[in-house]
Amino acid sequence: MAENTDDGEKMVNGSPDHWIRHQRSQRTTPKILFLDAYDSFTNNIVSLLTILLDAEVRIIEIDDEVLLRDDEAWTVELKKYDAVVCGPGPGDPHFDRDVGLMQRVWKQNEDETVPTLGICLGFQSLVTEFGGRVERLRRGLHGRVWRVDAAEEGRRAGGIFDRIQVDQHGKSGFQATLYHSLGVVEVGNAKGSGDGAKIKNANDLVPLAWARGEEGENILMGVRHDRKPFWGLQYHPESVCTDESAHEVLRSWFGEAKKWNEKQGRLVQQSNPDEHPRARRAIRPSLLGDVERTARLKGERHLVGRSKETMWGGTCMNLDGWGVGCKYKAATFPFPRGASVPEIFELLNGVDRQAILLDSSNNAIEDKSSGNPNLDVVRGRYSILALEVDKALRITCQAGRREAWQIHSVSSNVILEHYGESVWQFLADYQHSRRIPLEKVKHVPFAGGFMGYVTYEMGLHDIGVDDFLNKKGNSRWKEPERGHLRPDLCFAWVDRSLVIDHDTGLVTVQCLVREGEGDEKDTGIDEDEDTDMLWIFEAEEWLDGMRQKLQRHDWGQVLPLSEREGNGDARLPRPLPLVYGELDWKEGFKRDMAKEPVSTGNTPRSTTPMPKTVISTPDPKKYEEKVRKCQEYIAKGDSYELCLTEETKFVRPLPDRRDVGAIKRTERFPWELYKELRRKQPAPFASFMRFGDVTMVSASPERFLEYRPRYMPRKLITNGHSSHTHHEKRPRKQLTEEDENIDWVCTMRPMKGTVRKAPSAAYPKGVYAAEEARNILHTEKEIAENLMIVDLVRHDLHGVCGAGKVTVPRLMGVEEYKSVWQMVTVVEGVLSGEGGLEHYTGLDVLAASLPPGSMTGAPKKRSCEILRELEDRRERSMYSGVVGYMDVAGRGDWSVNIRCLFRWDDDVDGNNEIWRAGAGGAVTGLSTAEGETEEMFTKLAGTLGVMRGMYDEMEEIARDG
C-alpha cells in the first residue's frame, strides 16, 4: 500500500527507496547531483531545482573521503546523474579544502564529462580551474541586491540568458542577491555593459553576464566554457530577494545540459537496487524514523513509542512509563479582576521554588500600526506558568555525552545509542508515546508536556562545530574538558500548569492525569477502573481548588489601562528607566555605571565577600579589534556575516547561610530582578526560569520557532508554492471537522536590524515615527543583515519540510517595541502529514535549526567555528540558546535567549555568586568597528540598568524580611 512521504512522493512498503526502485521503469525523472560546500543556502537551491526542473536532486559533501580517494567510485557515482551543480560555500576557490570534489568535476576525462553548473563558490572554482583570476573585491557584497545584465553572448541561443526579456532600454537583466567577497573583475567597453570583455588567461571561458560595480568596474556574473558543458553563475538564484525572472536562466541551463547529453549519446546509469546510495536526500531523516531504523539494525522489534528496559541504565524505577496514557483535565474561567501575572505567579508558586514562566509581558501595549502592512506591534497573547515544577520529571543532557538523565525522586540514565545519534531521537520517541488528540486541547496553546531550555553549546555540538568531550580519554562518567557538568538541555515534564489568554481575558488551569498518579513506583499500568476514577477525581478537586484560590484572593486596587505600566500590570506607575542613547554614548555609559563598582576586562577572583555587586564589562578596544578580525574573515570569503558577542559578569555576595533573612533575600532576588526587567523592558517572549541548576530572567522580543496546526478547508489544499513566494495568509472561517484538514505550520521570525527610539548622535531628536524608523532600517546594511539570516532560516526549514513547502509571508517588516524598532521577517514551512516511516514533527525542525541563525551568522557552521575562536572558546551558555515548550498535542513555541541574565548554582567566585549577560551584533562587510561596539554597549546598557536598579529595592526587602 502506498503512503505519502515528506516531499509528496509515494512510498511502497514504508520506504522511499522501495518506491524509487518501483518507479524507475515507470518514469524518467532527471537526476541532479549537488556538491555541498557546507553552505547555509544549499537546501534553498535544491528546493528550487527540484520544483523548477521537476528533478530528483541528491547531495554529496565536497569532502566525501571515499570519493576523494577512489577514482573509480567517483566515476561510477557521476554516471548516475544527468547533471551536476557545484554549490556555494565559504572559503577560497584556490584552496583544495574549500572546493574538494568540485575540482574533480572540471578535470573529468572527456568521455566521462557531466554537464555542470557552478554557483558562487562553484562558479569561482570553474573560473580558477581554467585560468581565470579570482581576487578580493574592494568590498564584500554579501547580502547586496544588484542588477545583473546579460552580455551579448549570454543573450544568444545556448547562452542560457536567452530567455531573459529585453527592457525598453534594450537590456535584459534582473535583480539578484550576491553573497561573495571574491570575484572576477574586468574592464569592459566604454559603455560599461561588459560586452566585449574577456577573462584574462582564460581563453576557453566566455562571459555571459555582468554586474556594474559601485566604482564603474564590471564584475563577472555568468560564464560558460567554450568547448565543455560547464556553466557558472556568481549570483544566488535561490535567494528570496532574487527576481523570479532569473529562474529562466536555470531552465535554459538544464535545457542545454540535456541537449549535450543527447548529442553525446550519454545515458544515465540506474543505481543498483541493493546498493546503499552514496548521495543523500536534501530532506533529513525524521527523528522517529531514526528510532525505527536503529531498532531494526539492532534486530529489535518495532520501537517507536515503546521504550524498553534494555535502554535504561541503573535502576530506572519505571520512569520510562511516566506520563504514558495521560488524560487531560481543565477548568477555564475569567481572569481575576485586578490581578497581574507576577501576582498570580507569587500566589500559586511562591518566589523560592523551582519555576518556569513564559510571559507575554507586553500584552497591554497599544498597537499603533493602524493597518500599515510594513509596521506591527508584536504583543504576546498567552502567558504560561508551569506549576509544581519541583515535583516534575526532568530530562537532562550535556552536549557530547552518550546518555541523558531522567531525574525525579530517583535518577536513571538513558543510553542514547539505542535511539539514534543524539538526545533528540529519544525526546521524539518519548513525546510520541505520550501524544493526546489535538481536538481535546484546541482552546489552549499548551496543554502540558515538555518545558525547558537548550543552550547555544548544544546547537554547536549538533552541527559538528565542537564535540565538547575531554580529549584526554573521555568516558561518559568523567567531567568533560569544559570543567563542569551543567546540562545543555533540560526539559521538565509539566503535568500541572496555568494558561492566561490576554486577548480573551480567560484563565485555564489544567493538568495531565497520568497513570500511576500519586505513586512514584507505579508500573504505569492501569490496574482497574476504580483507581482510574480516583485519579480523575483528585485532578478535578485540584482544579477546583486552584480556581477558588484565584477567584477568592484580594487583588487590590484596579487601575484603568491608561494608568498602567507598559506591561499591563494593574500597579501604580513608576518612573521610566533610563535609555542609553546619549549623543556621546561612551560618556553616558561611564557616568551611569559609576554609581556601582565597574571594572573593564576580567574580574580578579576573590574569597572575600564584596559589599556590593561588581560589574565586569567588555573592553571596548578589544571588541573593536574582534570586529576588525570578523571583517577580515568576511573579506577572505570565510563567512558572509558573523554574529559576534561579548559577556558581562555581575559578581555579588552570597548570603550568610546562618542568616534567615539573607536566605530569604537571595531566594527572592532573581524574582525581583525579573519583575524589574519586565517592567522596564516588556516583551512578547519574556521568561523567568529557576529550573534545575540554572536561574534565568529574559525579556526576549524574538520568537525562534513556533509550530502548531493550521486548519484549512480541504478544497483549498494545494501541492505547495514556490519556495520563496510572498503571499498573504488565507482568511479563516468557521469549519466543521469534516470540512477541514490540518497543516502543521512551522513559523520562524528572524530579527535583524535595530534602531533606538531615544536620541543619539545620528538622530538627535530620537526616532519615534514609524515611517522614519522604516526608512532608517531599510538601508543597504540593515537589509543585508536581515536577508542573510532569512535565507539561512529558509535553508533550515527546507531541510525538514522539503521542496516547495517554505514561504515568506512577510519580508523585512518593522515592529515597534518599548524602546526600539526592529526589522523582522516571517518565514513559514509546512510539515508533511503523518504516515509512513518518515513522520516529521516540529521537534525535527527545532533539532535541525539550532543554534539560532540570528545568533550565528552565515554560513552557520563555518561562522560558528570562527566565532568560537574569536570569543576565546567562551561558552555563551543560556545566552543565544532557546527556551520554550513542546506540548502533548505536538505543538511548540520557542524564543531566543537575548536580553537576559542568568546564573548557575555552581558558578561562584569564593563567597560570591556570578550572574552573566551577553550582548553583541551582526558584523558584515558594511560594518564599522566603532558602530558595532556602540551597538553592543547600547544593548548591554538596558541589562546593566536593570541590575543596578535592584540594589535599593533589595535592601528594603532584606530589612522587611
Image: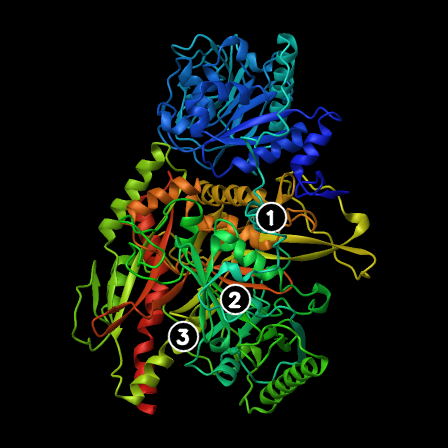
Q: Is mark 1 on a helix, strand or loop?
A: helix
* 750 up-or-down from 924: above or below: below
Give the image location of residue 221, x and y in percent: 49, 22
Q: Is residue 76 left or right of residue 642?
A: right
Q: Is residue 937 left or right of residue 692?
A: left
Mark with earlier residue (1, 3): 1
Q: Mark 2 points at which residue?
A: 451
Who is closer to the viewer here, 552 or 412? 412
Q: Which residue is drawn at the image coordinates 49% and 79% (left, top)?
A: 342
Say which mark, if any, is on residue 289.
1
Who is closer to the viewer here, 875 or 928? 875
The quarter of the picture where the C terminus appears is bottom left
Q: Which residue is drawn at the image coordinates 21% and 60% (left, top)?
A: 600
The residue mark sitting in front, 1 or 3, is: 1
Mark with earlier residue (2, 3): 2
Give the image location of residue 533, x and y in percent: 70, 82
- What whole-number distance in Å separates the C-alpha atoms at marks 1 and 2? 24 Å
* 832 up-or-down from 162: above or below: below
Who is closer to the viewer here, 122 or 68? 68
Amino acid under label 1? Gly
Amino acid under label 2? Met
Give the image location of residue 612, x and y in percent: 23, 76
Amino acid under label 3? Glu
Tags 1 and 2 in contact by the CB under 8 Å rule?
A: no
